[in-house]
Amino acid sequence: MQTAKQLIDGRWLTHVSGGERIGQAINPATGDVAALFCDGTAAEAEAAVAAALRAFDNTAWKRSPRLRAEVLLDFAAKLDARKEEIADWLVTLNGKLRREALGEIGAGISELRYYAGLARNLFGRVLEVEPGCYSSLDREAAGVCAIILPWNAPVTLLVRSLAPALAAGCTVVIKPACQTAVVNNMVLECMTGDTRVPAGVINSVIESGADVSRYLCESPDIDVISFTGSSAVGKLIAQNTAPTLKRLSLELGGKAPAVVFADADMDKTVAGLVAGGMVMAGQQCTAITRVLVEDAAYDAVAQKLVAALKAVKVGPGNDPASQMGCLIDVRNRDRINALMDTAQATQRVLLRGNVPGGALARGAFIEPSLVEVQDLSSDFIQKELFGPLLVIERFSNEDEAVTRANATRFGLAASVWSSDMKKSRRIAARLRSGTVWSNSHNRLFAEAETGGFRDSGYGRLHGAEGLNDFLQTKHFYFETNS
Ligand SMILES: NC(=O)c1ccc[n+]([C@@H]2O[C@H](COP(=O)([O-])OP(=O)(O)OC[C@H]3O[C@@H](n4cnc5c(N)ncnc54)[C@H](O)[C@@H]3O)[C@@H](O)[C@H]2O)c1
Ligand SMILES: O=S(=O)(O)c1ccc(CO)cc1
C-alpha cells in the first residue's frame, strides 16, 4: 500500500528518531483504507527546520532568481504530465469530483508558471537621497517559511503558497493535512527530482496531531508562516507565534453571501448558486453559504433553488455522472446531518438533504439542503458549516442587503447577482470581503490576489502581492563620493 513519507533534507524518510509511526488515510467514498502515512513528531519537524535553515543560509538558492524561475517552470511541466494520476488520488482521498480535482491541479500549474515569471522581476529601488548618497531598497527572501495546509484542496492550496515562497527565494517546511498527504507528496515529487535544487530547500512533515505544527509556530528559525485553514486555528497560530514575532499569512474560514437582486437573470443565477454552493460538497472556503434574495424575487428564487438542489446527483467522484462528491469523512457527514435535525426543529427547512442509502451509505455522502433563516444571530448564519447546506434570507433594499451580507465576522468572498452593473459595483464597494464576483462565483486566477477581511485572515495570495509575505525590504545605504 502507498505510504506517504517525510521529506527532510532531500530524502524521503519514515522518521528521524524513535520508532516508525504509521497512520491510515481513508477513502471517504467507501470507508476503506486507501493509503498510509508516516505520522511525524517534533523530532521530524526539528530536522526539517534545520535542513531548511541550512539551505537558506549556506546555498545560493536565495540569490538565484533565474534558477528558481527555471525550476518552477519544470515543476509545472512535471505536474502537468502527472495530472491524471494525481487527480485519481485526489478523488480517492478527498472524495471530490474528478473534474474538481483536475480543476485544482490546473490552477496549480497556472500558479507555478505565473510565479516563475515573477521570480525574474524582484526589482528593488534606488534613490539618490543627496548628491552621491544612495539608499538602495533591496527585496530579499524573508527566510525559512512554514506552509500549513488543510485537506480540502491539497494541490492548489499547496502550490499557491509554495510557488511565491520559492519564487522569492525562501526555503520551506510544509505541514500537509494527513488525509491527503499522498497527494501532497506526489506534487512535491514533481520538483524533488530536480538536481539543481539544493537539498533542504523543500521539506515536508506529515502528522495526525498538532505537535509538528506547534513546533513550527514556536521555532525561532521559522520566519514566515503561510497558513490555510480554519479561523479558530489561525487565531491559535497568531497567539503561538507572538513570542517569536513571525510574519503571518492567514487564509482562514469563510461564509460567503450571494446577494441576489430581482433584476438578475433568474435561471443563470440559480445555476450559479448551485454550482457556487455545492462545489466540493460545500467544503470550499469561498463557497456560497448564504443566499440573500430581494423581496420581489424571493419566492421564485427559493422555489427554483429547491428544484435545482434536489436535482443534484450525489455520487462517487470518479463516476462521470456524479454532480457532487462526498464530505471528507463520515464524522463530518454526521455533523451536517445533525445540523439538519436542529434546523428541522428550529427553522423553516425548504429542502432536507438526507444520507443516501444503498452503496453510498458506507461513504461520507449527504444530499444538499436549503434552510430559511432571518435571525442574523443564528448559528446557521454566523458559523462556518462546511458542507452542502445553504441558508436563504430575505432583504428589501440595498442598505439591508449590505447590512445582512456584512453581518458575520467572516469576509472572504461574496457575489452580487443583478443585471445592473452600476448597482453591483456600488454594492461590491460596501461589502467587507476580500473578493466580490458579479453574476458568477468562485472565479479564481493566479494573477488576482485573494484573501480575507476580519476573521477570514490577513495577507494576500495569488498575484504580485502574493510575493509580499515571502520578501523583506532591506535598506542598503552607500556613498559614491567618499
Ligand atoms: N481562506 C482560504 O483560502 C481557505 C482555503 C481552504 C480552506 N480554508 C479553511 O480551512 C478549514 C478546513 O480545513 P481544516 O479542517 O483542515 O482546517 P484546520 O484549521 O482544522 O486545519 C488546517 C491545518 O492546521 C493544522 N493545525 C491543527 N492544529 C494546529 C495548531 N495548533 N497550530 C498550527 N496548525 C494546526 C492542521 O493539522 C491542518 O494542517 C475551513 O475553515 C476552510 O474555510 C480556508
Ligand atoms: O479548486 S480551486 O478552485 O482552485 C480552489 C480554490 C480555493 C480553494 C479554497 O478552499 C479551494 C479550491
Image (tube, rainbow, N blue to C red):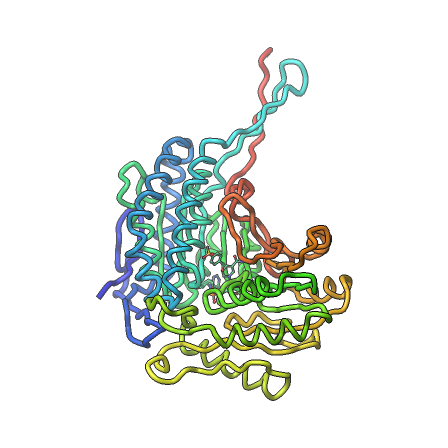
Q: Quadrant of residue 350?
A: bottom right
Q: Is residue 63 above or below residue 385?
A: above
**Residue drawn at 45 percent across, 57 percent down:** 148
Question: Is residue 236 visible to the viewer in this orientation of the structure?
Answer: no
Out of 17 and 396, give the one closest to the viewer.
396
Q: Is residue 480 above or below residue 432?
A: above
Where residue 433 sits: x, y (%)? 64, 56
Question: Is residue 237 visible to the viewer in this orientation of the structure?
Answer: yes
Q: Is residue 25 above or below residue 51?
A: below
Out of 300 and 203, give the one closest to the viewer.
300
Where residue 443 sits: x, y (%)? 53, 53
The N terminus is located in which quarter?
Answer: bottom left
**Left or right relative to 323: residue 350:** right
Where residue 420 sits: x, y (%)? 70, 54
Seen from this angle, which residue lies furthest top? 481
**Left or right relative to 449: residue 144:** left
The C terminus is located in which quarter?
Answer: top right
Q: Quadrant of residue 361?
A: bottom left
**Residue drawn at 32 percent across, 81 percent down:** 359
**Left or right relative to 301: residue 386:** left
Count of numbered labels shown in the rendering:
0
Q: Is residue 336 above or below residue 126?
A: below
Seen from this angle, which residue lies furthest left? 1
Where residue 346 sits: x, y (%)? 63, 86
